[in-house]
């Protein structure tokens, strides 16, 4: 069975998670469910949400990438009593002491293919539509829990194209014209 873990001072992890959550600010409620990407590599713990990335030195074993709700993880860490936190990852499970939580995990033999999706905190449909063009696979998008948002961005784009055609058809503009402009501007 694949396993990976990190051990870090609770105060260091808690301070970092609080800093990361400040990035959300007074965001809309759906942003409060922001997914935290946790990556363990050789002696490093990388924590990523759209708009920020933190890399912490800590004791590690093996490599893994996992995702969990940021605020949920913050609450779990706050509730821990020890001064040192050990987070152990197995197939789709994160264990902290006797608490086991279902998370999405991906294990790697090496850390050479671990890629994080870097997007601004105020990302838009444009950023979501560019993910596939930038070479992110469907699995990577799904792993980062962005599939639904990418799907929504595609639907919105199709709707906006229809609306634009309806408005501009009296000037001889057709769907092909609009799609060419969008592909050129968005580099899709």
Image: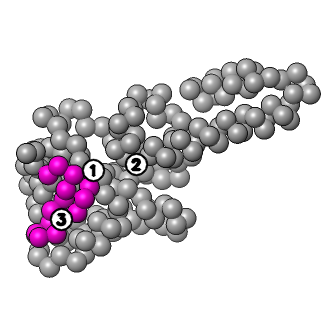
Q: Which mark is residue 67?
A: none
- Magenta range is 90-103
107 falls in the magenta region: no
* Res. 179 image quadrant: top right
Sequence-wise first label, 3 or 2: 3
* Image position, residue 70 (x, y; %): 35, 62
Q: Cβ–Cβ below 8 Å for labels 1 and 2? A: yes
The quarter holding residue 96 reads: bottom left
Pointer 1 residue: 104
Q: Is the stretch drawn in magenta largely helix, strand or loop? A: strand
Q: Is residue 47 above or below residue 96?
A: above
In space, the residues marked 3 and 2 are separated at their CA atoms by 21 Å
Q: Which residue is mark 3?
A: 100
Please name the residue that numbered disc 2 is placed on: 145
Q: Secondary structure at mark 1?
A: strand
Instruction: Name which residue lies at 43% across and 62% down.
Output: 33
């Amino acid at each position: 069975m694949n396993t990976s873990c990190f051990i870090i001072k609770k105060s260091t992890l808690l301070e970092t998670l609080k800093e990361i959550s400040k990035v959300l600010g007074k965001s809309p409620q759906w942003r409060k469910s922001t997914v935290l990407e946790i990556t363990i590599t050789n002696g490093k713990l990388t924590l990523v949400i759209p708009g920020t990335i933190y890399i912490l030195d800590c004791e590690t074993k093996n490599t893994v990438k996992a995702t969990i709700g940021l605020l949920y993880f913050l609450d779990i860490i706050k509730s821990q009593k020890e001064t040192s936190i050990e987070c152990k990852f197995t197939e789709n499970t994160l264990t902290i002491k006797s608490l086991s939580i279902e998370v999405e995990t991906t294990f790697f033999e090496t850390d050479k293919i671990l890629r994080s999706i870097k997007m601004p905190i105020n990302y838009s449909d444009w950023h979501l539509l560019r993910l596939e063009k930038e070479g992110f696979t469907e699995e990577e998008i799904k792993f980062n829990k962005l599939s639904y948002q990418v799907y929504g961005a595609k639907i919105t784009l199709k709707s906006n194209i229809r609306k634009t055609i309806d408005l501009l058809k009296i000037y001889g503009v057709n769907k092909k014209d609009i799609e060419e402009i969008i592909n050129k501007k968005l580099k899709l």
